[in-house]
């Protein structure tokens, strides 16, 4: 019997849509010129690159010159953070949150070692940052605020517009503007992104999170933003990202975002229904489980569940043996037994945090797949808890 293959790790990456693959294929073999070359091959590639940039700008309510192509979301975050601070030419203060993606947190930690001051703002128990806490953290030497649009582990949406409004008031009376960056990697394609409405100066997205290819991202840089490159070697991307442009992936990213934007409402309703079906099934059949994050104020496809008295990594392995792909917030890849930094910041009980699993769905998942997960998950949890002395003692009390 063929092994089932069910992919519930769409917050890590997504399957590239067939229409997106079709969109980029001609740029590998037919329209293959260097977009910076002056001959006809190059001009043809440049036209395609400009089309992709214009399409993405339109979908984000930005201008084409504000769209900078990068290699991924991590690079976009790094360019925003290091590029802004480099342009200031002096050290100062940064505000971020304790639940940011490591692309932001590790960047801030590196800057701390180099003499910058960093404030890591707390969240509430749902994983939401308080806009007032961010504004209160501003100092005379604050240079940059970077807060993600939605958390990648629990899906909680952050008050980006409120933070931007508060910073705008503060900036009226300052010599050095405080720049505001948001990592929107988890919301692109799931929430309508309007950079004018959000109010951020910089915004990062990555194509592979919304059924585009891996290896292409965008950093939106608002007109007038003082930012410097962090890699060097050419004039490309307004001088901010040197290197031969990836025309095929730029076209693919534009197509993926166009599809996601057009079908967003329909897809969100469907994915939300899958998430709620899975959540209800887990709560109805498995005792001592807890939902992490806010169901109302979150992206539709993320369900983070703590299964107490088991290790999340062990459950992941058992799920994988059943053909089910999910993820855990624990730092298993680094060999650490520490629980997720996100769940720790949310004050989730350490025992519960160790057993946390993130299921993340997309419109390519089916209700039948959710039914299958619910048919095997209770038994897997029971088998692991049977090996836990703590669970057995609790069960017998």
Image (cartoon, rainbow, N blue to C red):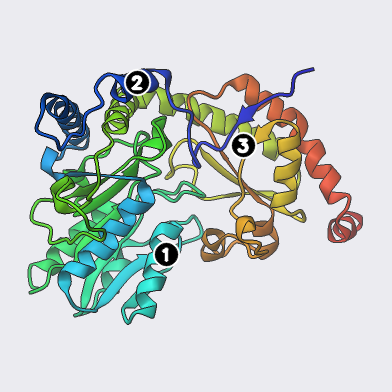
Q: Considering only order in the chain, which callout, 2 or 3, is on the residue closer to the N terminus? A: 2
Of the residues tagged 3 and 2, which is closer to the observer?
2
Q: Is label 1 or label 2 in front?
A: 2
Query: Does label 1 or label 3 sit earlier along the sequence?
Result: 1
Q: Is residue 281 above or below residue 148?
A: above
Image quadrant assignment for residue 191: top left
For marks 1 and 2 on the same chain, the one whose residue lies earlier in the sequence? 2
Asked which secondary structure carries label 1, the reply is helix
Answer whether labels 1 and 3 touch (C-beta < 8 Å). Answer: no
Label 1 environment density (alpha carbons within 10 Å; few <14, some 14–19, many ≥20):
some
Left or right: residue 328 compared with residue 212: right
Residue located 22% across and 33% down the image: 56
Q: Is residue 246 left or right of residue 348?
A: left
**Residue position for label 2:** 25
Residue ranking furthest to the right = 396
Q: Residues within 10 Å of mark 2 (few under 14, many from 20)?
A: some
Of circles 1 and 3, the one toward us is 1
At x 77% / y 31%, what residue is drawn? 376
Whole-Å distance between the Cαs marked 1 and 3? Answer: 30 Å
State the residue at coordinates (85%, 56%).
388
Q: Mark 1 points at which residue?
A: 105
Q: Mark 3 points at which residue?
A: 279
The reply to whether residue 217 is visible in this rendering is: yes
Task: Identify the element where label 2 is drawn.
Answer: loop
- The location of residue 49, given as percent across then percent down, is 19, 31
Q: Report helix, strand or loop for mark 3.
A: helix
Disc 3, disc 2: CB below 8 Å?
Answer: no
- From the top left corner, tell me how far across and down residue 36 is, in percent: 15, 38
Bin the neighbour count of mark 3 within 10 Å (Cα to Cα): few under 14, some 14-19, many 20 and up: some
């Amino acid at each position: 019997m063929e092994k089932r293959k069910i992919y519930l790790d769409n917050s890590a990456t997504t399957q590239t849509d067939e229409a997106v693959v079709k969109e980029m294929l001609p740029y590998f073999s037919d329209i293959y010129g260097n977009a910076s070359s002056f001959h006809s091959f190059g001009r043809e590639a440049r036209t395609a690159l400009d089309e992709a940039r214009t399409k993405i700008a339109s979908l984000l309510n930005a201008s084409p010159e504000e769209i900078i192509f990068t290699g991924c979301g991590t690079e976009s975050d790094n360019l925003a953070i290091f590029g802004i601070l480099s342009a200031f030419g002096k050290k100062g203060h940064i505000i971020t949150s304790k639940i940011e993606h490591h692309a932001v947190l590790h960047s801030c930690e590196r800057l701390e070692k180099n003499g910058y001051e960093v404030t890591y703002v707390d969240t509430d128990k749902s994983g939401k940052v308080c806009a007032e806490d961010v504004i209160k953290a501003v100092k005379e030497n604050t240079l940059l605020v970077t807060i993600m649009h939605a958390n990648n582990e629990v899906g909680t949406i952050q008050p980006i517009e409120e933070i931007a409004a508060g910073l705008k008031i503060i900036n009226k009376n300052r010599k050095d503007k405080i720049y505001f960056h948001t990592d929107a990697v988890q919301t692109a394609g799931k929430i309508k992104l309007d950079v004018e409405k959000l109010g951020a100066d910089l915004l990062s997205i990555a194509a592979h999170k919304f059924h585009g290819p891996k290896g292409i991202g965008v950093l939106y840089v608002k007109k007038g933003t003082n930012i410097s490159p962090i890699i060097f070697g050419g004039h490309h991307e307004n001088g901010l990202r040197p290197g031969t442009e990836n025309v095929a992936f730029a076209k693919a990213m534009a197509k993926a975002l166009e599809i996601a934007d057009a079908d967003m409402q329909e897809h969100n309703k469907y994915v939300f229904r899958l998430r709620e079906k899975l959540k209800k099934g887990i709560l109805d059949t498995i005792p001592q489980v807890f939902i992490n994050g806010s169901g109302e104020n979150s992206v539709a496809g993320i369900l983070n569940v703590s299964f107490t008295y088991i290790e999340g990594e062990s459950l992941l392995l058992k799920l994988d043996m059943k053909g089910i792909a999910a993820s855990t917030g624990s730092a298993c890849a680094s060999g650490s037994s520490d629980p997720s930094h996100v769940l720790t910041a949310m004050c989730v009980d350490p025992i519960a945090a160790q057993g946390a699993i993130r299921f993340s769905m997309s419109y390519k998942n089916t209700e039948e797949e959710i039914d299958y997960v619910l048919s095997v998950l209770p038994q897997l949890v029971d088998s692991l808890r049977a090996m836990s002395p703590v669970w057995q003692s609790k069960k017998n009390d």
